[in-house]
Amino acid sequence: MGRKKGVRFEEGAPDDFDPERPYDDPVAMLEMREHLVREKWIDIETAKILRERLKWCYRVEGVNHLQKCHHLVQQYLDSTRGIGWGKDGRHPDQHGPKVVPE
């Protein structure tokens, strides 16, 4: 026995999920919920990584951090928009536009 080579993860939403009738297929509904939770965790962890980079930039740049770290501040603020475990029950797409940095 050894490690399995070529392990594949399903990264997309389930194909058989119908958002207008979510309770028709309980397996697809659970897969969709797991997909949304997984995507939310990815967004949260990305924001944490950007926060650590921003802390490092503040420490390294010192008094010049306003000019030197501005791009990281923008990336961090954009990455935190619309993520979290709020109780409003809205889909992540409805939390407002997510600006993609150029």
Image (cartoon, helix red, strand yellow):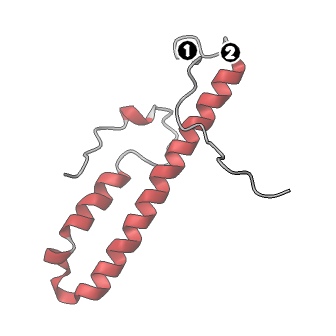
The percent coordinates of residue 44 (x first, y second) are 48, 54
Residue at (56% x, 20% y) in the render: 15
Which secondary structure, mark 1?
Answer: loop
* Disc 2 crowd, CA 10 A, few/some/many (<14, 14-19, 20+): few
| Front residue (pair 73, 5) | 5
Residue at (38% x, 68% y) in the render: 51
Position of 57 relative to 82 (above/below): below
Mark 2 → mark 1, Cα distance in angstroms: 8 Å
The percent coordinates of residue 22 (x first, y second) are 60, 16
Q: What residue sits right under mark 1 in the picture?
A: 18
Identify which amino acid the numbered label 1 is placed on: Asp
Q: Is residue 85 visible?
A: no
The answer to whether the residue labelled 2 contacts the one labelled 1, judged by CB atoms less than 8 Å apart, is yes
Whether residue 26 sits left or right of residue 84 in the image: it is right
Whether residue 22 sits left or right of residue 4 in the image: it is left
Q: Would you identify the image quadrant in which residue 82 lies?
A: top left
Position of 22 relative to 13 (above/below): above
Position of 45 relative to 7 (above/below): below
Q: Would you identify the image quadrant in which residue 93 lies?
A: top left
